[in-house]
Image: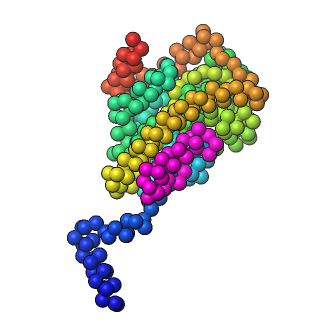
């Protein structure tokens, strides 16, 4: 070995052995690749926000960090991606908080029917101390929560008939997220609730394995559920958040600067995503009507009946997530509503 090469190798080995930073050229070459999985398609509000986040990371890191946004559940459904993050086989994802309740039971707080009356309440609680407290519970399970995005208020679709009153759900085979609160919510309403991953939902509707489902207008449009669903009944029965997650195994190995790049990009993408979701949501309803869906709103008296029936499960949610967290949330909402 030539003396100059030998000296460089020895210097590198010595520097690394002494814990000194590796020679800068090693850092110049290394680009950090981030696999970011999500379940909706690229044209959805989720896909558009993932692109915004990817661009923000590339810009802020000068190209040293590259987020590959991989949609349409190509990396698996939410639950599979969550496990991949915990094991360190995947770096990041966005998915539903509802599919996290098997990992962190406090996430079920966000499944509470009619918890939020509007997006202002949702933003204030989710982005405030209570949302952060629930998110921090993820760390002991190997996940890091960065921010919440908006999935939105959920509404019913089905192929049997318009849902104009509680009784119309009797016996309807309704797909729900894999989550105890959603299961008990719709069993309470008389539906035959069937838990399925989002990635299997379109084919389950198409093959009539299920009669209906519930999701925000944006998702009903971007996932083309109007092609296999006739009736859309506006219930706004629960506000669903999405959550940006990182693998804790991976996250703990990042530098402070890298973590700041990711957090800043997640926040910027959140603000974009909420604005985009709300603007597109209003248009989506009109689009769904133009695509032939028969749309109805429940009469106030019927909506009130559904609400009082659905909220009978709240006691079970409170004991599951812990009465103090439940009481703190209700008190914060009461204060906002004064
Ligand atoms: O990543 C897609 C799902 O997490 C999300 O859309 C959840 O609303 C959801 C559903 O119905 O599965």
> Which quadrant is the C terminus positioned in?
top left
| Magenta-colored span | 42-69
Residue 267 percent across, percent down from the top left: 44, 39
For the point 74% across and 40% down, which residue is it? 207
Ligand 1 located in image quadrant: top right
Q: Residue furthest top?
A: 301
Residue 180 percent across, percent down from the top left: 50, 33
> Which quadrant is the N terminus positioned in?
bottom left
For the point 36% across and 16% down, which residue is it? 335
For the point 37% across and 29% down, which residue is it? 128
User: Do we see residue 212 in this rendering?
Assistant: yes
Residue 163 percent across, percent down from the top left: 68, 20
User: Do we see residue 142 in this rendering?
Assistant: no
Q: Is residue 321 left or right of residue 170?
A: left
Report the front residue among 190 and 163.
Answer: 163
Q: Quadrant of residue 134?
A: top left
Q: Quadrant of residue 237?
A: top right
Against 334, is 11 above or below? below
Q: Residue furthest right?
A: 292
Q: Residue furthest left?
A: 18
Q: Is residue 309 left or right of residue 249?
A: right
Is 71 contained in the magenta span? no
For the point 57% across and 17% down, which residue is it? 306
Report the front residue among 160 and 278.
Answer: 278
Against 177, is 236 above or below? above
Q: Is residue 334 left or right of residue 7?
A: right
Is 43 contained in the magenta span? yes
């Amino acid at each position: 070995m030539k003396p100059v090469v030998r000296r460089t190798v020895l210097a590198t080995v010595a520097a690394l052995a002494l814990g000194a930073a590796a020679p800068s050229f090693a850092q110049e070459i290394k680009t950090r690749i981030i696999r970011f999985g999500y379940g909706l398609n690229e044209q959805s509000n989720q896909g558009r926000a993932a692109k915004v986040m990817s661009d923000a990371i590339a810009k802020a890191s000068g190209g040293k960090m590259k987020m590959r946004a991989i949609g349409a559940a190509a990396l698996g459904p939410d639950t599979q991606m969550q496990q991949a993050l915990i094991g360190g086989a995947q770096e990041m994802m966005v998915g539903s908080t509802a599919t996290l309740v098997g990992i962190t039971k406090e996430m079920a707080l966000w499944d509470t029917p009619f918890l939020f009356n509007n997006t202002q309440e949702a933003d204030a609680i989710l982005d405030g101390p209570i949302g952060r407290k629930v998110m921090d519970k993820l760390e002991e399970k190997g996940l890091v929560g960065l921010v919440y995005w908006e999935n939105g208020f959920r509404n019913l679709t089905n192929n049997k008939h318009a849902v104009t009153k509680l009784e119309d759900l009797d016996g309807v085979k309704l797909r729900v997220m894999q989550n105890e609160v959603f299961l008990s919510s719709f069993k309470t309403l008389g539906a035959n609730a069937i838990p399925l991953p989002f990635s299997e939902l379109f084919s389950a509707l198409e093959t009539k394995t299920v009669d209906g489902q519930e999701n925000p207008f944006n998702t009903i449009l971007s996932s083309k559920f109007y092609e296999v669903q006739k009736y859309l009944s506006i219930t706004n029965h629960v506000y669903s958040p999405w959550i940006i997650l990182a693998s804790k195994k991976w996250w703990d190995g990042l530098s402070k600067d890298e973590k700041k790049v990711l957090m800043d990009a997640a926040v910027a993408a959140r603000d974009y995503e909420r604005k985009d979701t709300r603007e597109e949501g209003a248009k989506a309803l009109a689009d769904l009507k133009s695509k032939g869906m028969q749309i109805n709103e429940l009469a106030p008296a019927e909506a009130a009946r559904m609400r009082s029936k659905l909220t009978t499960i709240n006691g079970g949610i409170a004991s599951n997530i812990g009465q103090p967290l439940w009481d703190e949330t209700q008190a914060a909402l009461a204060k906002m509503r004064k």
